[in-house]
Amino acid sequence: MTEPQPYSPIYPPMLYLIYATTDLPAPNTARLVQHMPFFSSDAQDDPTLTWTQGSSHSGQGSAVFIGHQLQMAGLAAPLPPGVIDRTVMVSPWGAQIKAAMRQHRAHISLVYAGQNPDPVEQMLALYALAGTFETEDLLGIVNPNAWNAHPPADFLSPASLAQFRQEIPFNLWVGYVRFYTDDQSFWLVTKGHHVFDVPDLAYFIEPGQDPDAVITLFTNLFYYLYEDDVFVTAGDTLEIQGTGQQLQFSQVTEMIDDLMGPSGTLVITQAESPD
């Protein structure tokens, strides 16, 4: 009998923590211990956290807790401009917050390397570990898979993680990026669905259309595809229950480098009503 293959995502969930100074913090193990009841009721499941810091300007390590394993590395240097342009600068936060994050001087990368196949639990593990590196110099959390970034606020607290387990924080874990074709029309496309094994979604916004309504549509479709484990492909149609509205899924045929996600992107259009 063939042995089962270990879980190994092609695009593992990861985060960058960005800091205002070049002095990298060491992780605070006590904060990770505070999160353990959230992951398990077994008080004996103490986390193992190692961090080697040759100087205040670099470090690396790993963390193991409740079946999760994560790798960490820090460097007293900003992220490449291309990463910032595709995360911080297209995030939904205000100009002042974006400007502060863009001026960061150091970063720590956190990469999920464990065997838990649940993407929500993977993200929660990353956020729990991120909380061990939280200091007053932490400017933001960057999610390159989702083309998104956000300030720390209280998003790293145990209470926030408990809320994230109940309801996925789409504004943090998914990006909604606009690619303009002219001054008023643009493609609105999700980024980061592939972490949840769901295709990204794209919709062409014309003048007068409400982008927020399309984002709500994206969210509802995500839940349908993710929670019901539904597979859709180009050419499929879907009727929205109770509305009579039909959606058509089709292939990306333009701006492929921008719109296409790592696990594919489906374009959504309103299907024509049958005669």
Image (cartoon, rainbow, N blue to C red):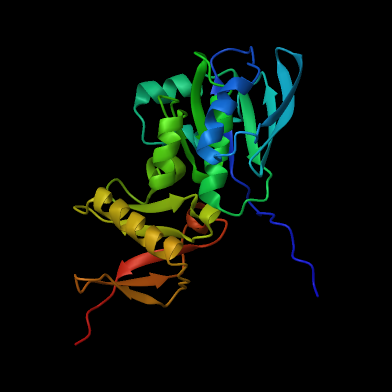
- Quadrant in which the C terminus is drawn: bottom left
Q: Is residue 73 left or right of residue 232?
A: right
Q: Position of residue 199 (x, y in %)?
A: 49, 61
Please name the residue shown 53% across and 62% down the image: 264
Rendered view: 11 above or below 153:
below
Please name the residue shown 40% across and 77% down the image: 236
Q: Position of residue 39 (x, y in %)?
A: 54, 40
In the image, 99 versus 169, the foreground residue is: 169
Q: Residue furthest bottom?
A: 275
Q: Position of residue 110 (x, y in %)?
A: 63, 34
In the image, 80 versus 116, the foreground residue is: 116
Q: Is residue 214 left or right of residue 152?
A: left
Q: Quadrant of residue 58?
A: top right
- Quadrant in which the N terminus is drawn: bottom right
In the image, 211 versus 82, the foreground residue is: 211
Q: Is residue 13 left or right of residue 164?
A: right
- Whether residue 82 is visible to the viewer of this picture, yes or no, is no
Q: Position of residue 104 (x, y in %)?
A: 54, 19
Rendered view: 170 above or below 254:
above
Rendered view: 213 above or below 245:
above
Please name the residue shown 45% across and 25% down the image: 152
Q: Is residue 188 left or right of residue 137?
A: left
- Whether residue 154 is visible to the viewer of this picture, yes or no, is yes
Please name the residue shown 49% across and 42% down the image: 147
Q: Quadrant of residue 72?
A: top right
